[in-house]
Image (cartoon, rainbow, N blue to C red):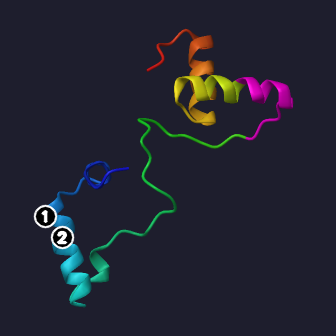
Amino acid sequence: MSDERLLQSIGMTEAEADARGKSYEEDTWDEKTLCKPRRGRPSLASEEVRPYTVRFPVSLMSFVDERAHTHGWTRSEELRNIVLQAKGQHVA
């Protein structure tokens, strides 16, 4: 993820990020102004997402991996797109 996209996802400009970084480096920052940190990177989804664990036969997952490689996607992206196709929605 680029710096620009990361800042956009958290609603911060580059100038704001630089100012916060400077105050942290100079030890003049006020920790009360910060939100509680969350795990992981910011979500790119427009709605809540949750992880799901499923079991697939190895041969079926090999098929998914081959499709993912063909499309230039990750395994997770390919699985999401297969489900979207089955649901009749457009795949990006």
Q: Nearer the viewer, residue 69 or 76?
A: 69
Residue at the (31%, 81%) spot, across then down: 31
Indicate left or right for 90 with 12 as reference.
right
Amino acid on which the number 2 mark rests in the picture: Asp
Indicate left or right for 13 with 67 as reference.
left
Instruction: For the C terminus, give its image quadrant.
Output: top left
Residue 66, x across and y down, in percent:
67, 25
Question: Of the numbered discs in the image, which one, if any, rests on residue 18?
Answer: 2
Image quadrant in which you'd find residue 44? top left
Q: Nearer the viewer, residue 31 or 59?
A: 59
Mark 1 neighbour density, 10 Å: few (under 14) some (14–19) many (20 or more)? few
Secondary structure beneath dot 2 equals helix
Q: Could you tell me if the residues under marks 1 and 2 are in contact, i.e. CB atoms within 8 Å?
A: yes
Residue 91, x across and y down, in percent:
48, 17
Residue occupying the far right of the picture = 57
Residue at the (76%, 28%) spot, across then down: 62
CA–CA distance between discs 1 and 2? 5 Å
Residue holding disc 1:
15
Picture layout, residue 88 above or below residue 53: above
Q: Nearer the viewer, residue 88 or 4?
A: 4
Image quadrant in which you'd find residue 61? top right
- Which span is picked out in magenta? 53-63
Amino acid on which the number 1 mark rests in the picture: Ala
Residue at the (62%, 19%) spot, across then down: 82
Residue at the (60%, 29%) spot, across then down: 69
Picture layout, residue 65 above or below residue 10: above
Is residue 52 shown in magenta? no
Mark 2 neighbour density, 10 Å: few (under 14) some (14–19) many (20 or more)? few
